[in-house]
Image (cartoon, grey):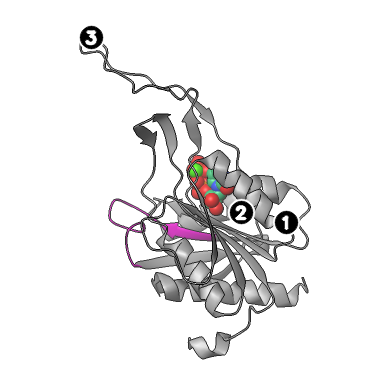
Amino acid sequence: AAAQHRTGDLSGRRIVVSAGGTREPLDPVRFLGNRSSGKQGIAIAEAARSRGAEVTLIAANLEVADPEGCDVRRVSTALELRDAVVAAAQGADVVVMAAAVADYRPVTVSDAKIKKDAGDGGLTLELVRNPDILAGLGSEPHSGTLLVGFAAETESDDEHLVELGRAKREAKGADLLVVNRVGWNEGFASDENAVVVIGAGGDVVTRAHGTKLSVAHDILDVVVSELTTTAR
Ligand code: CTP
Ligand code: CA
C-alpha cells in the first residue's frame, strides 16, 4: 500500500518499541545471546516515526544503525530491558515487544574469566528464568496501552504456526501478536520478512510479506485501526 495514505496517522501517539536481542553475561568476556538482528523492530520504530509518532526505542545489542528521530535507550540484558520497557510504557499508547528476550540467564556471573578445568570434561551452566516482560504488562490493567507481541517460531506448517501464535497471544495477554517463521536462513538477518498478525479472539487480522519496512507499515496499519476502533 502507498505510504502517503499513512502520513501523520500516528501523530500525537507515543510508541515504545523494543528491538534486538538480549545478552546474558557469564563472565567479563562471554554471554548467552541469540540471532536477532533487530531489523524488524527498527523498521517498526522508523515507520512509526515517519507516520508522526513519538517513538522510544529500547535497543538491545542492535546490529544495525539507530533510526533517525527516535529516543533510543540502550540496554543489554533481559532485566535491563524489562526496567527500560516498564518505565517507558507508562502512559504510552502502544508497546511493541519486538526484542528477542533471553528466557534464561546464568545464575551467577563470574567476576573473572571462567577458566577451563584441567582434564577434558564438559561444563554445565546453571540458568534461571528471566521475567516475561510482555506477560507482565499484559497481566496488569493496560486499557490505555495497546500491547503488541512477537513470536518467532520454527514451525513450518502454516496452520500450526497460527495456532502457536493464538496460544501465545492468549498466554501473554497481548492485544496483537505478530508471528514470523524463523530458521537457520529465515527471519533474523534478512531484510525481508513474512508475518501473520493475530488479533482478539485469535483472528488472523492480516498477513504481510516483503521488506521489513513494508511489513512494519502493514503491522502499524493494524495498530492504527485498533487505536481508532477502540478509542484509546
Ligand atoms: N518476551 C518477553 N519477555 C521474555 C520472553 C519473551 O517480553 N522473557 C516477549 C517477546 O519480546 C515477544 C513475545 O514475548 O514479544 C514472545 O516471545 P517468545 O520467545 O516467542 O515466547 P516465549 O513465551 O518466550 O515462548 P518460547 O518458549 O516459545 O520461547
Ligand atoms: Ca522465548
Mark before the other along the chain sequence, 1 or 3: 1
Name the residue located 52 percent from the left edge and 72 percent from the top edge.
69
- Residue nearest the observer in this picture, 109 or 165: 109
Name the residue located 65 percent from the left edge and 79 percent from the top edge.
11
User: Which amino acid, by three-letter code, is at mark 1?
Assistant: Gln
Identify the residue position indicated by label 2 in the image: 169
Q: Main secondary structure of the magenta part?
A: loop
At numbered mark 2, what does the secondary structure look like: helix, strand or loop? Answer: helix
User: Which amino acid, by three-letter code, is at mark 2?
Assistant: Arg
Furthest-left residue in this view = 120
Mark before the other along the chain sequence, 3 or 2: 3
Residue 163 seen by the camera: no
Label 2: how many Cα within 10 Å (few below 14, some 14–19, many 20+): many
Residue 44 appears left or right of 194 = right
Q: CA distance from mark 2 to mark 1?
A: 21 Å
Q: Where is residue 132, by image quadrant?
A: top right
Residue 182 in magenta stretch: yes
Q: Is residue 83 above or below residue 147?
A: above
User: Which amino acid, by three-letter code, is at mark 3?
Assistant: Ala
Ligand 2 contact, mark 3 (Cβ < 8 Å): no
Q: Which segment is the magenta one?
A: 178-191
Q: Where is residue 97, by image quadrant?
A: bottom right
Identify the residue position indicated by label 3 in the image: 118
Name the residue located 66 percent from the left edge and 56 percent from the top edge.
88
Residue 155 in magenta stretch: no
Q: CA distance from mark 1 to mark 3?
A: 51 Å
Mark before the other along the chain sequence, 2 or 1: 1
Residue 12 seen by the camera: yes
Please give the label number shown on residue 90: 1
Q: Is residue 183 above or below residue 192?
A: above
